[in-house]
Image: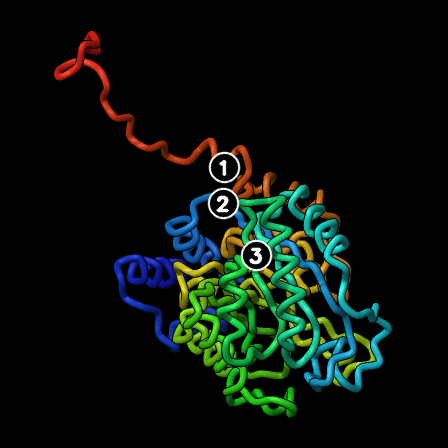
Amino acid sequence: MGTTFDQLADAVLAGTPATADDALAVLRTDDADLMSVVAAAGRLRRAHFGNTVKVNYLVNLKSGLCPENCNYCSQALGSNAPILKYSWLSKDETLRQAGAGLQGGASRVCMVSSGRGPSNRDIDKVTEMVGALKSEHPDVEVCACLGLLSDGQAERLKDAGVDAYNHNINTAESHHDTIVQTHTYADRVDTVGKAKAAGLSPCSGLIAGLGETDEQLVEALFALKELESDSIPVNFLMPFDGTPFENTWELSPTRCVKILAMARFVCPDREVRIAGGREMHLRSLQPLALHVANSIFLGDYLTSEGQEADADIAMIRDNGFIVLGSDEEIAQRPVDPAIRRRGAGTDVLPNA
């Protein structure tokens, strides 16, 4: 099987896109051939992202109290999960939280709020926060995740300095209505389109383990490719008590790695991010997954705790990777060509 996946990697590198049948073959690979899949997908990862890992940090601006009934979500309407619930963080607290993530090694801050979508007053709050954050940290990337956008809101975020907008499709269109009924799949696609039209980098991903079939996982990935999502967060269902998906355990560590590998074959040049649930489901295979994915969240998530941030950074380094934007990574970047200022045409002695 190793030769087959190497041939697929060769074809993708040569410009032939992976097909749905290719994706299904990756997903359905026998566990005995897992390393062959990882090695082949890793060639694509290295071709486009080298040995770098992008580190992202979440700041949950507003937690819980959501009117949407997404069955997987601990913050959703009807959820009895014992999570933290609070309204908007202050600007100062947001800056403190974001600064901690940046100090820990993150280069992108993801500013997230619960709810169906932001009001114009909410946009005012976020744009003020973004302006203050970029004033203190000019090089930081900011991704906003505020729910369904109304006309004109994406443009306001862009003007304020927001770089990207996250709105996950979460699952295949054919599976969407079984997991949420208060908004449609088309609503989600519309928001991704609004973000793109405003010049924001589209960030959209999925959640695996929601009772979807293999074919629906493939359908979701090809939809993300069609949406031209620049970054694809791959979440693994965390079955919180008090939600309709409590006690739902469909994922194994090897299946999670195969899902990430499939994403790499289908979207070889896109940022594939290991997102929520990685510690719970990948477990000891987290380091292996880095050889396929090129991005992770640092530390904690929206309503659940992640492993220690120092352990994340150590895992990256121990596997031969470097953090994107770190001093080590910057030192390895090619330098611009030095313009000749000596020799012919000058009064300076030549380099001879």
| Callout 1 amino acid | Glu
| Callout 2 amino acid | Thr
Residue that sits furthest to the right in the current view: 82
Where is 350 relative to 11, above or below? above
Gap in Å between the C-alphas at discs 3 and 1?
Answer: 20 Å
Q: Which residue is mark 3?
A: 142
Q: Which residue is mark 2?
A: 52
Q: Which residue is mark 1?
A: 329
Residue that sits furthest to the left in the current view: 344
- Report the label total: 3
Q: Are marks 2 and 1 in contact (CB under 8 Å)?
A: yes
Callout in the foreground (3, 1):
3
- Quarter of the image for residue 303 reads bottom right
| Callout 3 amino acid | Val
Disc 1 residue crowd, few under 14, some 14–19, many 20+, Cα 10 Å: some
Residue 188 at x, y = what percent?
53, 81
Q: Is residue 352 visible?
A: no
Gap in Å between the C-alphas at discs 3 and 2?
Answer: 19 Å
Disc 2 residue crowd, few under 14, some 14–19, many 20+, Cα 10 Å: many
Q: Quadrant of the N terminus?
A: bottom left
Helix, strand or loop at disc 3? strand
Q: Nearer the viewer, residue 123 or 50?
A: 123
Helix, strand or loop at disc 2? strand
Where is 323 relative to 95, above or below? above
Nearest to N terminus: mark 3 or mark 1: 3
Q: Nearer the viewer, residue 106 or 145?
A: 145
x 41%, y 72%: residue: 197
Residue 218 at x, y = what percent?
47, 77
Gap in Å between the C-alphas at discs 2 and 1?
Answer: 7 Å
